[in-house]
Image (spheres, coloured by chain):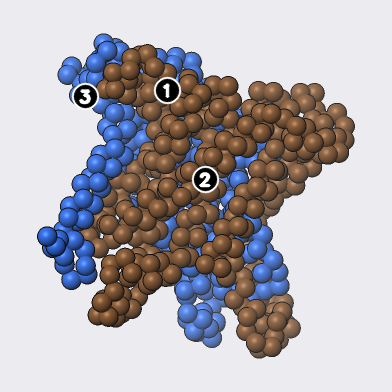
Amino acid sequence: MKAKTDLSGTSTGYKVFAAVVLILVALFFLFPLYWIVTGSFKGVIEINAKHPVWFPTSPTLENYMKLFDNPAFQWLFNIIFISAAAMVLTCITAALAGYALGKKRFIGRGVLFTIIICAMALPKQVIVIPLLQEMTAIGLNDTLWAVILPTVGWPFGVFLMKQFAETIPNEILEAARVDGAGELRTFFSVVFPMIKPGIGALAIFTFVNTWNDYFLQLVMLTSRENWTLPLAIANMQGEMSNDFGLIMAGAALAAIPIVVVFIAFQKYFTQGIAMGAVKG
Amino acid sequence: MAQNTVAPQQKPNKQKNSQFSGMSKALVRRETISAYCFLLPSLIFFVGFVVVPMFICVFYSFMEYGLGGIKGFAGLDNYIKLFQDPIFHRGFLNTVLIVVIAVPTVTAFSLWVSSAIYKMHSVPRSFFRCVFYLPVVTGSVAITVVWKWILHPYNGLLNQVAGTTGFDWLGNSSTAIWFIILILFTTSIGQPIVLYVAALGNVDQSLVEAAQVDGATKLQVFWKIKWPQIMPTTLYVLVITTINSFQCFALIQLLTKGGPLNSTMTIMYQVYDTAYRLNDLGYANAIGVVLAIIIAIFSAIQFKVAKTD
């Protein structure tokens, strides 16, 4: 028997198959997050049960109370501060530099752009060893700035903002110049409003990526009070590897804010990622 | 990526100065000065915290550099040691295994998901795109610790469901790496899906319709019309997935620390282990430099293959 097909030639059977597979895989992807959140409310007995406890039957806050016996608010503040500072500094420097690279014709432009592309392809973690020594030399090791400054230096933002700046029509910049607007004036009243969506995308992208840049935090932050929440979870997991309730509470506290930010700004985020690649 | 730098030079006649055509010398100078003023804040960070450490990294790789500081010039010793080091050999093979398995599966699967969802109504499309991106956002540490629990020999869900109580999936040298790859896979497909959904949405519909009128099958339309048009995206996906797979770190540090018996040792993890556990900074930097070169070679091969395709 011939399968039913629609105009574009897709059989109904395939569509059903695709939908089922998609939903199953989606459940598989959602499960770790579900397991973190439900696990954080499970008591010791349910955590160590010999049979799967799919849902906490007697939810408890004891894991969170244990978590806040530690400086968890400080850790949460540290990661928010690092991500926010890196975000603001990256957006400012990248918007200025991206405009220059995208719209100005100057000596050394080609070379500079090539260096930026090459740097983006290199593994960031390789330079962390010298970076740590540099931070020690300028007295910033084991401070939040030791994570913030290298994050701002990473050239992806400049690349992304260049892509956005290139879409500004030359006529508009020309018109501003004819009207007697200076360089800074042109940037703030003409360029900035036009690349705003790009800056929004870059802001969310930088915030999320900095939050999750575990390796840099691991190498740079050593004192307990300077840890970030993700780093603290990782370290606690090493110290008391079987207290999964406590670790899930930490993981939930680290994951939920960033997931909320992501869902709230999903549109900008996906646009920004797509924009960074389409013309690259 | 390279297209952008090449494009201005392709204009006929003026090879090198094409970007300055029609500009007076004074104007070029003025534009250059103002451009660098705009670039300055960014360049301070870029040069200070990316370019300088890169050079230091290369410099250290030629030094004998242990706990007490630099002991002297080592020449190529660190690099020679690397070729004789069985741990590096193991790490290299594991890294290649991870890349060779993860990159094609991530690319193919994300392309399949994207083509299944890009024509959907915007609500289910956003839903699926969001779900597949969640592990990226949740963060490698949170995802890794929950997997550690799921895979735990006694308290873990996997053994409870599979009835294999006590089996240590991560402590077994033949299963550990496959779980690393599986978890890496779940944290890697989010970005490619976003990219592919955007790229498929931009495919020229008139060509697709023309082909359908001519009686092309769904598969023909995909391979002959859509595939060439999304090639730049595929290339980008291949490169970023390769770089991510090479750099996968949190997973290994938190789950296995390269073990058991170095079965999950990777080049990236060996850099960290050599620097901060063994305190051999010269050697660690040499491994880092080699890792950078390997990534550059992989990226170049992908560019080459994609261009001749």
Tag 1: residue type?
Trp
Determine whether the residue tagged by mark 2 lies in a helix, strand or loop: helix
- Relative to the observer, which residue lies in front, A147 or A115? A115
Which tint was used for chain A?
Answer: blue
Report the residue marked by disc 3.
A54
Image x and y of residue A265, in percent = 33, 52
- Separation of residues labelled 2 and 3 (CA atoms): 35 Å
Q: Nearer the viewer, mark 1 or mark 3?
A: 1
Report the residue marked by disc 2.
B100
At 59% from the left and 66% from the top, the residue drawn is: B2
- Relative to the observer, which residue lies in front, A87 or B108? B108
Left or right: A178 as drawn, with respect to B47: left
Do the residues indicated by labels 2 and 1 lie within the same chain of the protein? yes
What count of labels does the image hold? 3
Q: Are marks 2 and 3 in contact (CB under 8 Å)?
A: no
Report the residue marked by disc 1.
B169
At 70% from the left and 82% from the top, the residue drawn is: B15
Image x and y of residue A250, in percent = 38, 26
Image x and y of residue A249, in percent = 34, 24
Residue B51 versus residue A94 in the image, above or below: above
